[in-house]
Amino acid sequence: MKRIPAISALMTPFPWHLEASGTVAQARTLMMRQGIHHLPVTDSEHQVIGLVTLAALPDTPDALVEWMEPVPCVDAHMRADQVLEMMAESHQSVVVIVHHDRLAGIFTWTDVCERFADHLREPFLPPEGNDAA
């Protein structure tokens, strides 16, 4: 029997993040270098305290804490369909995945689109295995 996967099976694991003592300039540099648009902000214990988005960063090098947005955090064991439903209902483009209250991953609309495209292609892929006699 097939089961709905946990969000941990679909998330981007071990995402780039910045500690709360970081600056806007550090966040922008990291995001541009890695080609990412969302950056979780963590405290010294790797607990998520917010999120910065590239589009919302100001042009000043001020302390990052002033520019953080709240971000929904979900447990890594939560079913993926429940996370998707929550994102749709609340119009969230990103959720942060936590395991034992620590940053474990990130799940964005980009991840949703990539996973759905994979799902649509799956029936049309060649069968796995070796068919040689």
Image (spheres, grey):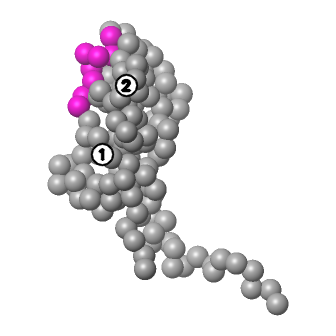
Q: Name the residue under label 2.
A: 42
Q: In which quarter of the image is the C terminus?
A: bottom right
Position above or below: 87 against 48: below
Q: Can residue 14 be seen in this view?
A: yes
Q: Do the residues labelled 2 and 1 touch (CB within 8 Å)?
A: no
Q: Does 56 sit left or right of 32 as displayed?
A: left
> As displayed, is residue 87 above or below residue 124?
above
Residue 73 location (% of width, % of height): 29, 40
Q: Mark 2 or mark 1, which has the lower sequence index?
A: 2
Q: Residue at x 44, y 60 (%)?
A: 115
Residue at the location (32% across, 22% down)? 57
What numbered label is drawn on residue 101?
none
Q: Nearer the viewer, residue 124 or 84?
A: 84
Q: Which residue is drawn at 39% across and 31% down?
A: 39
The residue tagged 1 is: 74
The image position of residue 80, as x and y in percent, is: 34, 59
Along the line of sight, which residue is nearer the eye, 114 or 104? Answer: 104
Q: Compared to 4, does 102 lie above or below?
A: above
x, y percent for residue 35: 50, 35
Amino acid of disc 2: Thr
- Whether residue 87 appears in magenta in the rendering, the answer is no
User: Where does the N terminus fall, quadrant-wise?
Assistant: bottom left
When the figure is inspected, residue 15 is found, relative to residue 85, above or below; the finding is: above
Tell me the distance, in whole angstroms, between the alpha carbons under discs 2 and 1: 15 Å
For residue 96, what is the image quadrant?
top left
Which amino acid does the dot numbered 1 rest on? Val
Residue 3: where, in percent of width, then height?
39, 71
Q: In which quarter of the image is residue 70?
A: top left
Residues shaded magenta? 63-70
Q: Nearer the viewer, residue 55 or 71?
A: 71
Can you name the residue that lies furthest to the front here?
100
Q: In the structure shown, which secondary structural element does the residue marked by tag 2 occupy?
A: strand
